[in-house]
Amino acid sequence: MSDEGISNLSTEDRRFDPPAELAENANATAETYQRAEADRLGFWADAAHQLDWGTPFEEVLDWSDPPFAKWFVGGKLNVAHNCVDRHVEAGHGDRVALHFVGEPGDTRDITYAELKDEVSKAANAIEELGVEAGDRVAIYMPMIPETVIAMLACARVGAPHTVVFGGFSSDALASRVDDCEAKLVITADGGYRRGNPSSLKPAVDEAVAKLGDASPVENVLVVRRTEQDVPWDDEIDSWWHEAVGNASSEHEAQMFDAEHPLFVMYTSGTTGKPKGILHTSAGYLVQTAYTFWATFDHKPETDVYWCTADVGWITGHSYITYGPTAAGATQVLYEGTPDTPDKGRWWEIIADKGVTLFYTAPTAIRTSMKWGDEIPARHDLSSLRILGTVGESINPEAYVWYRDTIGGGSTPIVDTWWQTETGAHMITPLPGVTSAKPGSAMTAFPGIAADVVDDAGTPVGNGEGGYLVLTEPWPAMLRTIWGDDERFRETYWARFEAQGYYFAGDGAKKDADGDIWLLGRVDDVMNVSGHRLSTTEIESALVSHPKVAEAAVVGAADDTTGQAVCAFVILRDSAGASTDEQGGEDVVQELRTHVGKEIGPIAKPRKVLIVQELPKTRSGKIMRRLLRDVAENREVGDASTLADSSVMDLITSGMSDTKNQED
């Protein structure tokens, strides 16, 4: 990033105040910010005291050896006890913990009392298989209740887990099992996806075989979900329904140190040596539980919460398995995709289960925009009172569509910024406090210290762009990279070592009010004729056009301007034009003109390619590096982590057919 920082091109004048009734009864208020500002560590100590402790902590934060933090020093607790047992002990055992909805249409409701029994049985079963506190367990599962149960059972016995997304290959699984030396793998015969069973157990067998004699895996525990025939080795394989089904439901939860490792989460798209993010117990649980309660204004007696993420990602860890259960939430757990058996599946589930709090990714929102307003209109979504977004910045027009079409025009949206590394929400509106701006993450969560700085680490002024940093340690922060403290220092702390800042890797700007807008990864910022342009702002301008559902922008090398803006655009189904149809070129020119009008001629794309889909990972992230390959006419790089690798063939052929669109 040059000394000029990132150019601040777009403006947003719309504001949405909290509904009066919500503001009046909100969990978090303006006083919450004041309390955190007055005594940050005391604020987090108060949040920690909402949990059950076997041994009280003596010190809130030990920051004597930065960047290695210790939170709630001297305290001991059990994460699973706090997520399950204490709700039963408090008399809430009959509250539904999980409304499970399988893709084929099967359903199960599991109460907290039943969840306690199942977690205890699973804990006994994995201990019977030789797992002890400190041993690592790999979990490679579909989105079914046993996945959550397995994670909580590992936490109960003090065995750090690493959950590997069920869409990943046997190679990816093998590298993660090898890196954390997993003693046990918990998997399933398969799961359901888009109407068909997909297998999982064979990939586990392949992963173990790839590791050969060096494999750390001693046992494989298999859930029967799809009834597929799977390879079987009596030496190491066991059925879940036998091992767990026959185990005792009595299990005493042992108390572990506040800094006891809870899980290792490998960042998506890792090449070479996997990068395992280590999260520990108490700090992580305190912040995920408190942010869930405050950000979603959760009321345990009346709310039904649904996060659509997969538990293979950090969102599923923090805001399905741990944060909501620690708060005693009732939540929906859905196995399948949003378009199976039809494109109204999500909205049907919301209406059927009476979902009040809904948390999903902007890419899913833009896909729903593409499908058309008439699909959600067929369902009663009036139960919704708070909507959330996660994973990337949401374009202002997608934000407004989400609010109006899904939220009935009045439901607040919490646009949350955080990362695998941060563990929990860091920057977000609070639904009872914030006058929200479409597309802005707004301000740091109470008790969190974030800023936007220039190359020298100096905070930028309002209206200026730069690097997003975290200036103080936080409870749910990563503790290190598994087995590689030096890589941890170099990756996250070296850029602003003198200031002691954590660098998130994202560009951001402060608007005229000082509110924070995310501008995408610094690696995605383009330099066009000396101007540092954010891909996020140009994508937002494109999505603000009524014919556009989704857009991805990259910079391509250009001899004249340094880089040129290239845009890949998905049209709404109602737009009725593509590059293969009459009017397609008219749409392209219309979009180029629209961007120039919205944020200035400098941002006008050199090329606009109309596409049917964008290259996305299975978590919904757009892989812009592949689009840069296409835009610069070079061989497309590794596409193995894409949800659909054939997308790149279609985009490449389409790019070669486009004419030079420059004025």
Image: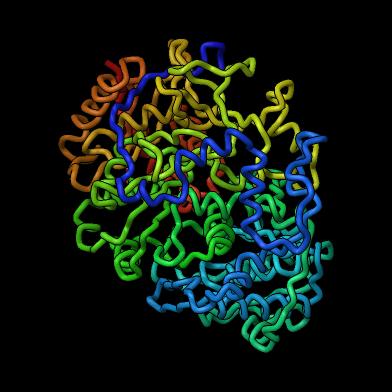
Residue at point 48% right, 56% down?
309
Q: Residue furthest left?
A: 582
Residue at point 43% right, 38% down?
393
Q: Is residue 230 above or below residue 395?
A: below
Instruction: Give percent across and percent down for residue 123.
Output: 71, 75
Q: Which corner quadrant of the image does residue 145 belong to? A: bottom right
Q: Is residue 88 visible?
A: yes
Residue at point 47% right, 40% down?
428
Q: Residue furthest bottom?
A: 246
Q: Is residue 238 left or right of residue 425?
A: right
Q: Quadrant of the C terminus?
A: top left
Q: Which is nearer the eye, 164 or 157?
A: 157
Q: Quadrant of the N terminus?
A: top right
Instruction: Give percent across and percent down for residue 290.
Output: 56, 51
Q: Is residue 216 left or right of residue 329?
A: right
Q: Which is nearer the eye, 430 or 192?
A: 430
Residue at point 71% right, 49% down?
278
Q: Is residue 117 above or below residue 472?
A: below
Instruction: Give percent across and percent down for residue 636.
Output: 51, 38
Q: Is residue 483 above or below residue 492?
A: below
Q: Is residue 654 left or right of residue 308?
A: left
Instruction: Give percent across and percent down for residue 509.
Output: 47, 24
